[in-house]
Image: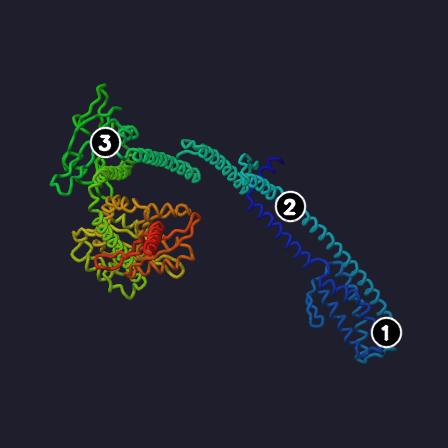
């Protein structure tokens, strides 16, 4: 029995389903059979109704009632005859409009029918003799009575037989129903047992374990060892629990920082995608950790050298030593040298030289004198080309500094030019025994920009010291320098206005692109997100004639002919496709020219916000760029000469400031700054003077400024009430004129003339006294 139960537990669910289905089909067949063949069928009802009541049907044929029922006697005879014939032979019986099929009688009923027929036929023949007029009822009276009594006796016997037959059929039906009920109960029990123990119980176990699995309890296992579908599911869930447990252990170790952890329960040929994904994640995290360490190393290095550069920017020699000594240590190298590019005066014909400022080797400062021409050796080549040089196989005689301890000579050399804004200020040379990783090379390049900027500032500071020493000799030239500064400011303002107009013009062109696409000097390209050119205006087509881009037109791919800069421009376009607006200036040499072009790359958006492409606007801003460079030069000159102007406006007790036509402060002296400081206002250039005035004073002073901006000289005297006494202040607002005698701003000087007024008053009074005498 146990083996049978074990085998039954291993049955496939579909086989159990087939068994239950077959049981249901057998049940349906049995029910159909019972309903069709047992119980009160049409035949049994007809037999009970007609044959069982044949004595009642024949009652109108009683000898005493024949005369009364003469009209229907013949019909009753035919009905009894039809009824007897049908049940004797079997066949169809027409009851009204309904036809009932009657089967042949069994032996007992057949014998009773034969007896009834034997008594009926003589009585029937007597009735027909009466009906045919052969004899009268009085003549047939005795015979009819005896024959009728014999017939009725058999009719009553038939009634009893029909009744007994009905009871037998009822009993047979009851037995069949009991058997059917027992079968149904057995079938229900079988279905219940199959569903309860072979389906629901395993499903319940699976659901409990699945719930624990969903809660994160991976130690639970489904104890259901079957070979059917549910057993397969249970084994898969157990396998899944094992996989998740291994995955959890693995991710826990990864979360604890153990990035070298192994994944248990999986081999190289395992198709466990989760394990493979987690292993890939671990590998990626290992790479990310290495990248983070490299970034942290670079960040810490930049921060460290930022402090060094900030604290040693007044002496190039000491600055160079601090840089190269710390850089050699931080790079874990052996030797290093820092070269600075000289900057001869503009009036000299001397070529710039590359001078060794500091050297460091084997934890010692090396004092060497070395001067290299541009293009000479690797150092000169790096300056000439403006790019780094990295060698990994250095000849033994290449390194000039050798250790007295017999240490291994460096085999790797890194030479990085120090440049800012494409201007080279010096060179760093690092020699190392070990190869220098790429991230450290990039670190030196990034640091090189900061070093170049600091060297430039240090040189500027040295030149500033020289200028400060010469400032006393420039006193007589101050007025001319002031006028020159004013002119420079006018030029700066004109440049700013020109830039503002250019920006406004660019915005207008962008908003009316479709109407002005070919009526502009700008180069315009429209591309879709597949980098396919949709529109090119005639300006850029003319510009590309005779170049490698000449074949570019609508329908071409915008990246196909870009060569080495393809990835760079693809990055610009992709940023625009992501919604970013780009604006930048680069040098251009499409036709060999040396020009500056400004690019605006904007995304093209539909009304629903979807980005479908990008627009590329470019224009030649060489003149503007040159003006900016000139402006920087002017600003440097102004800075150098600003010390003289500061000395001039700050060596007075008067307040002084100058504003432009937009009321923005250009220059302000320390006296006025200190007065505003007392009110909590840090007054400085660039602030709008109207925003600093009290509301009740703003209209009055704006009116005076506007008068001066129209070219008038405004002079006012005002009495100011003070706690220590009233003061009389004289204020002068005078226009500042440009090269073309246009007003570009105003200067305002306020002076305390209280003592002067008091002296004038006393003088007047004295004159009156003297005149009176």
> Which badge, 3 or 2, is on the more N-terminal residue?
2
Above or below for 436 versus 178: above
Above or below — where is 709 with respect to 260?
A: below
Q: Can residue 131 be seen?
A: yes
For mark 1, what is the residue? 63
Above or below residue 394? Residue 446 is below
Closer-to-camera residue (74/379):
379
Spot occupied by residue 517 in the image (x, y as percentages of width and height): 26, 63
Q: CA distance from mark 1 to mark 2?
A: 69 Å
Numbered disc 2: secondary structure = helix
Given contact means CB atoms under 8 Å apart, are the residues at marks 1 and 3 in contact? no
**Mark 1 → mark 3, Cα distance in angstroms:** 162 Å
x, y (%) of residue 770? Answer: 32, 54
Residue 198 or 352: which is nearer the viewer? 352
Label 1: state its secondary structure: loop
Q: Which residue is mark 3?
A: 317
For disc 3, the neighbor class at 10 Å (few under 14, some 14 to 19, many from 20) is some
Q: Secondary structure beneath disc 3?
A: helix
Answer with left or right where residue 592 lies relative to residue 20: left
- State the quadrant of the N terminus: top right
* Residue 199: % across, % down: 59, 44
Q: Earlier in the sequence, mark 1 or mark 2?
A: 1
1 or 2: mark nearer the eye: 2
| Residue 387 makes an appearance in the image | no
Task: Report the residue marked by disc 2.
Answer: 192
Q: Which mark is residue 78?
A: none
Choose the circle earlier in sequence order: 1 or 3. 1
The percent position of residue 510, horizontal first and vertical second, equals: 30, 61
Give whichever of 365, 739 is nearer the camera.
Answer: 739
Location of residue 15 (image quadrant): top right
Q: Is residue 176 left or right of residue 689?
A: right
């Amino acid at each position: 029995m146990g083996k049978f139960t074990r085998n039954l537990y291993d049955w496939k669910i579909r086989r159990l389903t087939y068994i239950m289905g077959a049981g249901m089909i057998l049940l349906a067949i049995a029910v159909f059979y019972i309903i069709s063949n047992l119980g009160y069928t049409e035949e049994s009802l007809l037999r009970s109704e007609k044959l069982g009541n044949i004595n009642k049907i024949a009652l109108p044929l009683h000898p005493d009632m024949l005369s009364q029922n003469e009209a229907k006697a013949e019909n009753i005879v035919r009905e009894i005859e039809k009824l007897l014939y049908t049940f004797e032979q079997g066949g169809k019986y027409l009851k009204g409009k309904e036809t009932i099929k009657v089967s042949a009688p069994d032996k007992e009923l057949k014998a009773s029918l034969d007896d009834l027929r034997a008594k009926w036929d003589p009585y029937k023949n007597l009735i027909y003799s009466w009906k045919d007029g052969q004899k009268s009822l009085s003549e047939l009276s005795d015979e009819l009575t005896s024959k009728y009594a014999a017939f009725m006796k058999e009719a009553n016997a038939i009634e009893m037989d029909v009744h007994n037959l009905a009871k037998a059929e009822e009993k047979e039906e009851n037995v069949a129903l009991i058997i059917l009920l027992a079968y149904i109960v057995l079938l229900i029990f079988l279905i219940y047992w199959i569903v309860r123990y072979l389906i629901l119980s395993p499903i319940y176990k699976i659901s409990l374990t699945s719930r624990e699995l969903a809660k994160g309890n991976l130690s639970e296992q489904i104890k259901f060892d079957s070979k059917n579908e549910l057993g397969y599911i249970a084994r898969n869930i157990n396998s899944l629990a094992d996989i998740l447990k291994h995955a959890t252990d693995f991710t826990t170790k990864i979360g604890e920082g153990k990035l070298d952890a192994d994944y248990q329960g999986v081999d190289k040929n395992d198709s466990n995608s989760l394990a493979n994904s987690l292993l890939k994640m671990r590998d990626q995290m290992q790479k990310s950790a290495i990248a983070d360490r490299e970034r942290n190393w670079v960040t810490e290095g930049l921060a460290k050298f930022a402090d060094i550069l900030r604290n040693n920017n007044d002496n190039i020699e000491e600055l160079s030593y601090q840089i190269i000594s710390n850089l050699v240590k931080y790079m874990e190298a052996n030797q290093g040298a820092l070269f600075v590019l000289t900057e001869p005066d503009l009036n000299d014909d001397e070529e710039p030289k590359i001078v060794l400022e500091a050297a460091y080797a084997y934890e010692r400062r090396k004092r060497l004198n070395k001067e290299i021409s541009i293009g000479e050796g690797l150092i000169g080549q790096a300056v000439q080309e403006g790019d780094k040089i990295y060698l990994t196989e250095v000849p033994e005689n290449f390194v000039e500094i050798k250790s007295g301890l017999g240490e291994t000579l460096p085999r790797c050399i890194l030479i990085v030019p120090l440049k800012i804004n494409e201007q080279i200020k010096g060179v760093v040379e690092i020699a190392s025994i070990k190869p220098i990783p790429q991230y450290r090379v990039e670190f030196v390049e990034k640091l090189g920009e900061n070093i170049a900027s600091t060297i430039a500032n240090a040189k500027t500071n040295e030149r500033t010291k020289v200028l400060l020493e010469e400032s006393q000799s420039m006193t007589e030239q101050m007025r001319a320098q002031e006028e020159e500064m004013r002119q420079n400011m006018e030029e700066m303002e004109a440049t700013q206005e020109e830039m503002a107009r250019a920006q406004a013009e660019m915005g207008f062109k962008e908003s009316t692109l479709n109407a002005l696409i070919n009526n502009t000097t700008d180069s315009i390209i429209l591309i879709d997100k597949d980098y396919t050119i949709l529109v090119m205006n005639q300006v850029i087509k003319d510009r590309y004639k005779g170049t490698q881009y000449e074949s570019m037109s609508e329908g071409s791919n915008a990246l196909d002919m870009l060569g080495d800069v393809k990835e760079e421009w693809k990055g610009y376009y992709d940023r625009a496709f992501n919604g970013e607006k780009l604006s930048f200036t680069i040098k251009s040499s499409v036709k060999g020219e040396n020009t500056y072009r400004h690019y605006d790359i904007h995304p093209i958006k539909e009304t629903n916000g979807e980005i479908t492409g990008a627009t590329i606007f470019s224009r030649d801003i060489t003149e503007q760029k040159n003006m900016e460079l000139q402006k920087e030069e002017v600003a440097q000159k102004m800075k150098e000469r600003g010390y003289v102007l500061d000395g001039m406006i700050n060596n007075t007790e008067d307040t002084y400031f100058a504003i432009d036509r937009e009321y923005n402060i250009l220059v302000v002296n320390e006296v006025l700054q200190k007065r505003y400081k007392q009110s909590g206002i840090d007054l400085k250039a660039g602030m709008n003077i109207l925003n600093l005035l009290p509301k009740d004073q703003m209209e009055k002073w704006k009116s005076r400024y506007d008068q001066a901006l129209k070219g008038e000289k405004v002079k006012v005297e005002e009495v100011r009430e003070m706690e220590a006494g009233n003061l009389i202040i004289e204020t002068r607002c005078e226009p500042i004129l440009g090269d073309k005698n246009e007003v570009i701003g105003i200067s305002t000087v306020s002076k305390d003339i209280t003592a002067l007024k008091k002296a004038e008053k006393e003088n007047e009074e004295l004159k009156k006294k003297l005149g009176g005498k």
